[in-house]
Image (cartoon, grey):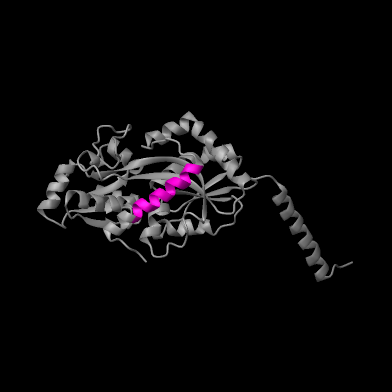
């Protein structure tokens, strides 16, 4: 006896409905979790994401897939997470340049950093380092400032993009030292470093995790770092603040979930990340990349974000940077 088309569709619908119900009934997580990095490969949060993802997946009980969604200074990837399903299967591993600076830099970043996201986990912070290629005459901060004063507007520095911390640190140094370095934005820190290595640009501000291996192997010269105190990973590098106390800026790395994800799912991820950050092998790798792992609880992460939004808004206004 042949089944008519409507009966076939009805039975097929029942089967799909049953499968969907069974998947929904399974405890979270029951499929891979996407950890979205809104910048290109090679940057701080990409490095951190790939270091923690295996341990994170093991702790949460599901595969953790790192997905780079770069573009518009981090806006594209950040928007995609804000608009994703509120089921906990899409999380954002971001840095403060996207989450705390872009809302002041862009007229319409496409997301609300406070209302569109739930602070899930703070991982750590790291300074930026001003670097030059081996053999460069720019070995110290004094060398850089002297050259910039001698020929205003001729000395250039590369950054990971307009409005990033690496861009604004150059603007801060210009203001603090009374100089005029030319800013050259790149689409991520990796191409910026590559052009410094190749001699196309004389200087770059790069996050310590993205530059530390080049510094250790002698492929880059470290001139100064942007933290208030010297880094424990590279204490030989002086801080910019030792000469210009107001010139301080770090990048912090944190995980956010889109608003609407259940409190139970948020808690499961936080417990899993507690396990990840308790692992000595993971901590050693992160510290080795230059991260300061001082804990900030989720409740304080929201406060930190609001403080950073206010801080960087002032710096963006002073720099005159504005993007559509």
Vertical comparison of 107 with 42: above or below: below
Evaluate whether residue 184 shows in this view.
yes
Question: How many labels were placed on the picture?
Answer: 0
In this rendering, position of residue 119 left or right of residue 243: right
Q: Residue at x 50, y 42 (%)?
A: 298
Region in magenta: 299-313
**Observer able to see residue 39:** no
Identify the image quadrant of residue 240.
top left
307 in magenta: yes
Q: Which residue is at the far right?
A: 1
Tell me if 218 is positioned left or right of 273 in this view.
left
Residue furthest to the top in view is: 280
Q: Is residue 280 above or below residue 213?
A: above
In the drawing, does residue 215 fall left or right of residue 269?
Answer: left
Quarter holding the C terminus?
A: bottom left
Please state which of residues 299 and 110 is positioned toward the viewer in this rendering.
299
* Observer-nearest of 260 and 9: 260
The answer to if 101 sits in the magenta stretch is no
Image point (28%, 61%), residue name: 320
- Judged from this view, the residue extending furthest toward the bottom is 5
Residue at figure coordinates x 43%, y 62% from the top left: 109
Residue 56 position, x and y percent, is 54, 39
Q: Main secondary structure of the magenta part?
A: helix
Determine which quarter of the picture holds residue 214. Answer: top left
**78 relative to 143 in the view: left or right:** right
Quadrant in which residue 242 is drawn: top left
Q: Position of residue 141 (x, y in %)?
A: 18, 43
Q: Which residue is found at the position 59% from the left and 56% from the top? A: 85
Image quadrant where one finds the N terminus = bottom right
Where is residue 304? Give x, y as percent.
43, 45
């Amino acid at each position: 006896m042949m089944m008519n088309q409507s009966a076939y569709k009805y039975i097929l619908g029942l089967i799909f409905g049953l499968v969907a119900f069974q998947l929904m009934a399974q405890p979270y997580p029951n499929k891979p979790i996407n950890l979205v990095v809104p910048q290109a490969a090679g940057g701080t949060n990409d490095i951190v994401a790939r270091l923690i993802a295996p341990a994170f997946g093991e702790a949460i009980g599901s595969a953790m897939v790192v997905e780079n969604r770069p573009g518009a200074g981090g806006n594209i990837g950040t928007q995609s997470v804000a608009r994703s399903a509120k089921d906990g299967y899409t999380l954002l591993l971001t840095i403060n340049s996207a989450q705390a600076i872009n809302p002041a830099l862009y007229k319409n970043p496409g997301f609300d950093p406070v209302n569109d996201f739930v602070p899930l986990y703070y991982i750590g912070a790291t300074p930026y380092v001003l670097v030059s290629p081996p053999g460069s005459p720019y070995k110290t901060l004094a060398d850089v400032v002297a050259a910039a004063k001698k020929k205003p507007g001729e000395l250039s520095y590369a950054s990971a993009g307009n409005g990033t911390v690496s861009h604004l640190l150059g603007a801060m140094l210009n203001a603090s030292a009374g100089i005029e370095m030319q800013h050259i934005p790149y689409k991520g820190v990796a191409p910026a470093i590559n052009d410094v290595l190749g001699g196309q640009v004389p200087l770059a501000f790069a996050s310590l995790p993205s530059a530390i291996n080049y510094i250790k192997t002698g492929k880059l010269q470290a001139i100064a770092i942007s933290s208030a105190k010297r880094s424990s990973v590279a204490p030989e590098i002086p801080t910019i603040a030792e000469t210009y106390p107001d010139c301080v800026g770090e990048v912090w790395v944190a995980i956010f979930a889109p608003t609407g994800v259940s409190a139970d799912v948020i808690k499961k991820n936080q417990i899993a990340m507690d396990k990840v950050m308790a692992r000595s092998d993971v901590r050693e790798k992160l510290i080795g990349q230059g991260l300061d792992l001082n804990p900030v609880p989720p409740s304080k992460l929201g406060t930190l974000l609001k403080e950073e939004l206010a801080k960087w808004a002032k710096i963006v206004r002073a720099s005159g940077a504005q993007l559509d």
